[in-house]
Amino acid sequence: MALDSFRRFAESEIRPALEAYEDSFVPREEMQSLVRQLQPFGVINGPVAEEDGGFGLDMVTYGLLFEELARASADLAVVALLQMECSKLLAGVPGDLTRPYLRSIAECEKFGSIGISEPDVGSNIAEIRTRARRDGDHFVVNGEKQWISNGHYSDFNICVAQVENDREKEGLALLLVDREHGYTSRNIPKMILNSQSTAQLFFSDVRVPAANLLTAPGKGLGKMLGLLDAGRPLVGLMAVAVAQAALDDSIEYARNRKQHGKYIAEHQLIQAMIAEMATEIDAARLLCYRALDRVEKGLGSAVESSKAKLFATDMALRAVNKAMEIHGGNGLTTEFRVEKLYRLARIFPITEGTSEMQKLIMARDLLGVSAF
Ligand SMILES: Cc1cc2nc3c(=O)[nH]c(=O)nc-3n(C[C@H](O)[C@H](O)[C@H](O)COP(=O)(O)OP(=O)(O)OC[C@H]3O[C@@H](n4cnc5c(N)ncnc54)[C@H](O)[C@@H]3O)c2cc1C
């Protein structure tokens, strides 16, 4: 019932609201209002415990809601994913530091962001260069983060930084950096997903209280990688949502377009494409939910999450390609949705770890040797 009512809401309210922006940037106040409307459905911070302002949803239920949101708007799904991931990271930190931030996400006041990637650091995340130098009861942060979702309107960044003192590097840690501490941002234009923000963040002698350290030095990367185990199948579900939309549009088009005296839906080669798309979408969806189930049960999911992301995101590329073929020349025009889906599908093999990295993660586990 919850899913049905969310689907109706997302289709009637969220999809038209975002479509009206035609892939242009949604101003912060409008984005906040949309997030407020989504919050009661549990799609913003659902998996966080109730005492931390969430709904205590299991990850599979969250995935079902998230897939619906992604079908209505991939831009808003990215915003929701980041709010959820920030909440999860903050909820696990003992003490009172993170309470106001958790509350501000639950009350849709603040936007969070996560800073791993840098101009020279993408797949090689162990080589992060952003520095947090100890200076009395503060850190002085210097560096640059790249591709940061929610970044331009973020109120805080959970930043992966190398902690160092006068003598040595202590290790990578997570640091909670508030916008008020002084980081700046620049929005990055992309081929799609421009209604939300992907940004560069600049840290230039940003002074952050030492109390804002969220993990011990040396523990930051492990904590972040654990989070990605849940993030990857969710990105996979975004790809599934795109592929499903491509299939839905293809079925509709094939039933209405006539060539050689009959609807193209009646041609066997078109039928083959539809059947292949449907089969692959189902397989990808099941891989994603299996990975989320393992995350929820704490069964260890790095390999299953990588399989789900790799298959779902590659599958979406195949699906939009077939949808484009089925639409013929009309697929190339901006007047049909399939053109947008084609561009959208290209994003997912890159975010939260590229397809190549997913293969290397799996092969490391299977072979017992690391190639990176
Ligand atoms: C829309 C979007 C949103 C994002 N949001 C965030 C965010 O919120 N926070 C954040 O921190 N980051 C974010 N990212 C960054 C994303 O995680 C990185 O883009 C991704 O990890 C790849 O890094 P890169 O772009 O630097 O590519 P690179 O690492 O430079 O890779 C380039 C190519 O080389 C390949 N390659 C690299 N190393 C190897 C290897 N060892 N073996 C074989 N092939 C290899 C890659 O697979 C790829 O094909 C986002 C990116 C996008 C596009």
Image (cartoon, rainbow, N blue to C red):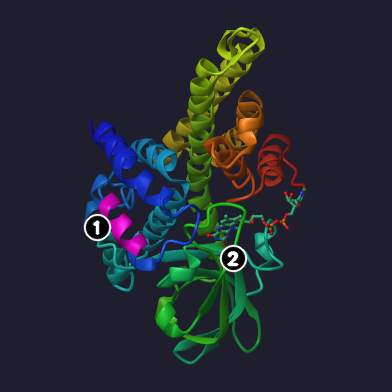
Give the quadrant of the N terminus: top left
Residue 88 in sight in this render:
yes
Does residue 69 appear to the left or right of 218 in the view shown? left
Q: CA distance from mark 2 to mark 1?
A: 32 Å
Please report the residue visible at 61 percent of the width from the left and 39 percent of the height from the top.
333
Please report the residue visible at 37 percent of the width from the left and 35 percent of the height from the top.
64
Please report the residue visible at 60 percent of the width from the left and 38 percent of the height from the top.
313
Q: Which residues are magenta?
A: 30-38
Does residue 46 appear to the left or right of 149 in the view shown? left
Question: Residue 275 occupies which quadrant of the picture?
Answer: top right
Q: Check disc 1: other Cα within 10 Å, few if <14, some if 14-19, many if 20+.
A: many
Q: Is residue 259 magenta?
A: no
Q: Is residue 35 magenta?
A: yes
Q: Check disc 2: other Cα within 10 Å, few if <14, some if 14-19, many if 20+.
A: some
Which disc, if any, is residue 276? Answer: none
Q: Which residue is mark 1?
A: 53
Ligand 1 visible in quadrant: bottom right
Residue type marked 1: Gly
Q: Nearer the viewer, residue 370 or 122?
A: 122
Q: Which residue is mark 2?
A: 188
Does residue 15 appear to the left or right of 319 in the view shown? left
Residue 183 location (% of width, % of height): 50, 80
Q: Residue furthest bottom?
A: 136
Choose the circle earlier in sequence order: 2 or 1. 1
- Residue 165, above or below 97: below
* Whether label 2 touches label 1, CB < 8 Å: no
For label 1, the SS is loop
